[in-house]
Amino acid sequence: MAVYTVSQVSSHIKESLESDPLLMDLWVVGEVSGLRASSAGHTYFSLKDRESLLRCVMFKGMKGAELLSEGDSVSAHGKITFYTRGGTTDFIVDLAMPEGVGELALELERLKQKLAAEGLFETSRKRQLPRFPKKVGVVTSPTGAVFQDIRNVLQRRYPLTELVLSPTIVQGPEAASKIAAALELLDREGGCDVIIVGRGGGSLEDLWPFNEEVVARAIYACKTPVVSAVGHETDETISDYVADVRAPTPSAAAELVVPDAYALRRNLEMTAAMLFRSAIDQNSRRRSELTAITRRMEMGLPDTQTMRRRVDDVGRMVQSASSRLLQKSKMQVEGLGLRLRALDPVATLGRGFSIVRLPDTGQVVSSAKQVSEGDVLEITVADGSLPAVAGLGTPGQRPKSPSAGPQRSKPKPKARPKQPSGMAPLL
């Protein structure tokens, strides 16, 4: 017979309870009893009916804890676990709703809570839609009005866009898997810039495939931005939370994914007009600036007319001064010429004077002391030169011969004007 320790038994109980598929995903309806909150923010209570009681724990942050009230009947979702240290079986509640809420609503809240905890609803991962998509994909029923509405809107707003349909059923037990498969195919092979997933309005049951986890994960895995357009404006599905953008209706989704061509045209026309006006204004400003610069340059330039007149005045003054200077210089030259002619030896010779030289040295005789009796002289007159010999005696007298007798004195000739230096009267 085998004997086990308490720990072994407790561990076996824990493994058995926590591996049971039923106890791992469990909905329980009961009355709240013994409700209390810990300082850490956890909530402890029990769910009971007429015959049994189940200990429950809701950890901090679980949805629905604020709805719990002593004595209220609630529906709670969670799993069964065994606390080995205390030897107690606990129901770990992750969602609590007032009793009377439908089963689908409870499941929806549970799945929303689960996917939110995994980060599928994070706004930080949501992508911007392309501004000018070339190809738009649609995952919906080929027979419904949704695809036709989307096509009409795209044709009216932005006919440049190509529309691609990935057909699928959107209602029924198999719809969720079909929607996920159609979405995966379009994302992988469609080459789309954006994808619209949607269907028309209906009840919660009709829209339920878009609340399935498989569809949510398919949207989350898409590399292409996804727009969820399920039901009417008041309808909300898990697809709306996971998608990059939620549209209230399929037609609104079509308007979100493409621009309005008419508005683009008007914007282009306004932009062109604004650019034209800007160019005109800029041209006008540049023209004004050029005119101002030209004026400043003209003001900075010299007054050529005045300078030309000044040059003319200076020219006339220079010409007049030059004429006066030239006349004065001419008179001076003429005076110098007269003086030079007066001092010209040739002219002097022409007036009867002569030049006496010593032929041996060419020295001009300017003093009687330079000549001794008997010296040979050369006398230059106006028309040539005459040889002569210096002798004693008074000018105008011949020397007395030794044999000559007494001579009768002759009257003195009249005094001649004083001769220039170096000149002698003709003999």
Image (cartoon, rainbow, N blue to C red):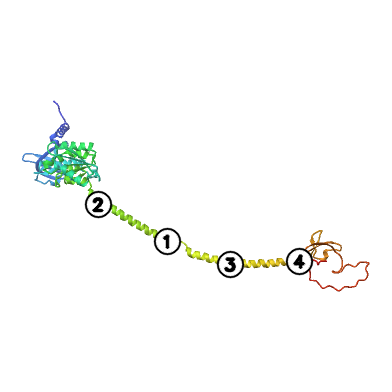
The residue at which mark 3 appears reads as 321
Please tell me in which quadrant of the rendered image residue 95 appears: top left
- In the current view of this chain or complex, which residue is farthest to the front? 383
The residue at which mark 2 appears reads as 266
The residue at which mark 4 appears reads as 350
Q: In what quadrant of the picture does the C terminus appear? A: bottom right
Where is residue 82? Give x, y as percent.
15, 36
| Label disc, if present, on residue 296 of the rendered structure | 1
Q: In the structure shown, which secondary structural element does the residue marked by tag 3 occupy?
A: helix
Mark 4 and mark 2: span between their CA atoms? 120 Å
Mark 4 and mark 1: span between their CA atoms? 79 Å
Check if mark 3's residue and mark 1's residue have beta carbons within 8 Å.
no
Mark 4 crowdedness (10 Å alpha carbons): few <14, some 14-19, many ≥20: few
Check if mark 4's residue and mark 2's residue have beta carbons within 8 Å.
no
Where is residue 228? Give x, y as percent.
18, 43
Mark with earlier residue (1, 2): 2
Mark with earlier residue (4, 1): 1
Mark 2 crowdedness (10 Å alpha carbons): few <14, some 14-19, many ≥20: few
Mark with earlier residue (4, 3): 3
Q: In the structure shown, which secondary structural element does the residue marked by tag 4 occupy?
A: helix
Q: Tell us which disc is closer to us: 3 or 1.
A: 3
Disc 4 residue type? Gly
Q: Considering depth in this image, is 246 or 160 the residue closer to the camera?
A: 160
Mark 3 and mark 1: span between their CA atoms? 40 Å
Q: Considering depth in this image, is 299 or 28 the residue closer to the camera?
A: 299
Query: Would residue 149 appear left or right of 310 to someone viewing this image?
Result: left
Number of numbered discs on residues: 4
Mark 3 and mark 2: span between their CA atoms? 82 Å
Where is residue 347? Give x, y as percent.
74, 66
